Amino acid sequence: WAQQGTWESAERAELILQRLEAMTDPTTNSGPVAKLVRPTAHSYATVIHAWAKSGGGADAARRAQAILDRLLTETKQPGDEDAVRPDNVIFNAVIDAWASSGDPQCGSKAVELLRQMKDLDEGLYCDNCAPDVVTYNSVLSAWSRSGHINSAVQAERILKEMILARKEDPERNPAPNVISYNTVLHAWSKSSLDGAAERAETLLKFMARSDQGDIVPDVYSYSSVLDAIAKSKTPGKALRAKSLLEHMLESPAIKPDKLTPVPFNAVINAAAFSAVGTCDEERREALQVAVKIFPLMRSLGVEKDTISYGTMLKAIANLVPAGDKRYTMSLQLFADCCDKGLVEDLVWNEVQRCVPDRMMSDHVGMGPVKSLRLRDLPRQWRRNQRSNRSRRRRTKGAPEYSKQNSGSKNNNSNNEDSQPQPFRRNVVISEASWQSGRDM
């Protein structure tokens, strides 16, 4: 039940736990079963984990917290020496429940539990409640997800506290690992504070200079900093992001088979958002960055995703003046995206920004584009949508429901829908130029 990931399954898991507790209650059952069937710390941690994964937000986190509070209350009452005493696994599960809740107070709630663990470690009411690296990473994750304006500042403060404690007493305190640092970098990438990108870069440089092998920056580390740069208001951020990406690709710690489109997309995004309040020279530089990075993914064996196409179209819409070059580039990108089945809302919206309605309607061949929604486009163009992929994973091979629009089409609609419908390309001389990334 704990693995189902729903509110109902978490309730079922807790109900089973309550039955176990009732069977061992000395006031209602004193027979041999009471001694043989007892909930363990793992039982409680499993139910708390069920609430953490239930998607129930703050209400689920409060249910998890209530289980921990009840355990702490019961262990302080005399009489039952066999009562389950909470350990750091149970505490970590509750912190994870708060981190997953999306509640604005989840960061402060997680810190309260961290302080409570430190206080209880020396007491008599818990077993091994000393915070471990999972504890700290869960607290960092809570701040990172909290949406609080100072979440990144608070996360970095916890990280520094962790580093200092490790130096003072390495026997008792865990060392931060790359997940710890990456979580703080993620917090900075989501921060709206001035200087967030600089703070993220400083932390990344510290990781790269460190002689600790377990905090060497990975692709996620660089991607978070690139995301922070893309969202910043720093002049020349496209070139800055490109330089950092090149540094990542030169790093011996970054293996080619570990590359993802995320850092490349972030650089193109930095270029796309270099259009506001910038001079013509910076806009040209930003466009050159986008044009160089997009084909670089293919040369490195990195599969483009829908974000790659949508962000590149955004860069064209923002940086290329209206005219034949803009329209040709955009339609070629869209055609390639259709062939790969990656058309989603971002791509569909951005290509309409790039190309006039009449021209777009002629190329799509389905009537006025203003009246078309994403779901109206051929399924072949959308076959690899993220929602479709996740649905296939959830159904585990179950047949798809294919009659969503029953009555609106004739009986041949399913056969037509299942046939590949490639985007209609215009053959133009400039296509070879665009494919090479030269002389747009």
Image: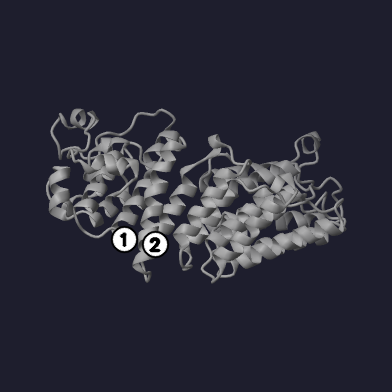
Q: Is residue 379 above or below residue 201?
A: above
| Callout 2 secondary element | loop
Residue name at image x 26 percent, y 51 percent: 351
Q: Is residue 236 at least partly visible in the picture? A: yes
Q: Nearest the camera: 229 or 137?
A: 229
Q: Is residue 130 above or below residue 363?
A: below
Residue 400, x across and y down, in percent: 33, 32
Q: Is residue 56 at least partly visible in the picture? A: no
**What colouring style does the render use?**
one colour
**Residue 21 falls in which quadrant of the image?**
top right
Marks 1 and 2: in contact by CB < 8 Å?
Answer: yes
Residue 397, x across and y down, in percent: 41, 28
Question: Would residue 332 be found to the left or right of residue 269 on screen?
Answer: left
Question: Would residue 326 be found to the left or right of residue 207 on screen?
Answer: left
| Callout 1 secondary element | helix
Mark carried by residue 232: none
Q: Amino acid at mark 2?
A: Phe
Q: Amino acid at mark 1?
A: Asn
Mark 1 surroundings: few (<14), some (14-19) or many (≥20) residues within 10 A:
many
Give the CA distance from mark 2 to mark 1. Answer: 8 Å
Q: Is residue 407 above or below residue 230?
A: above
Question: Would residue 122 be found to the left or right of residue 202 on screen?
Answer: right
> Mark 2 highlights which residue?
273
Residue 418, x across and y down, in percent: 24, 29
Residue furthest to the front? 439
Q: Earlier in the sequence, mark 2 or mark 1?
A: 2
Question: Would residue 177 be found to the left or right of residue 375 on screen?
Answer: right
Mark 2 surroundings: few (<14), some (14-19) or many (≥20) residues within 10 A:
many
Residue 88, x across and y down, in percent: 76, 50
Q: Nearest the camera: 342 or 291?
A: 291
Image quadrant where one finds the N terminus: top right
> Mark 1 highlights which residue?
318
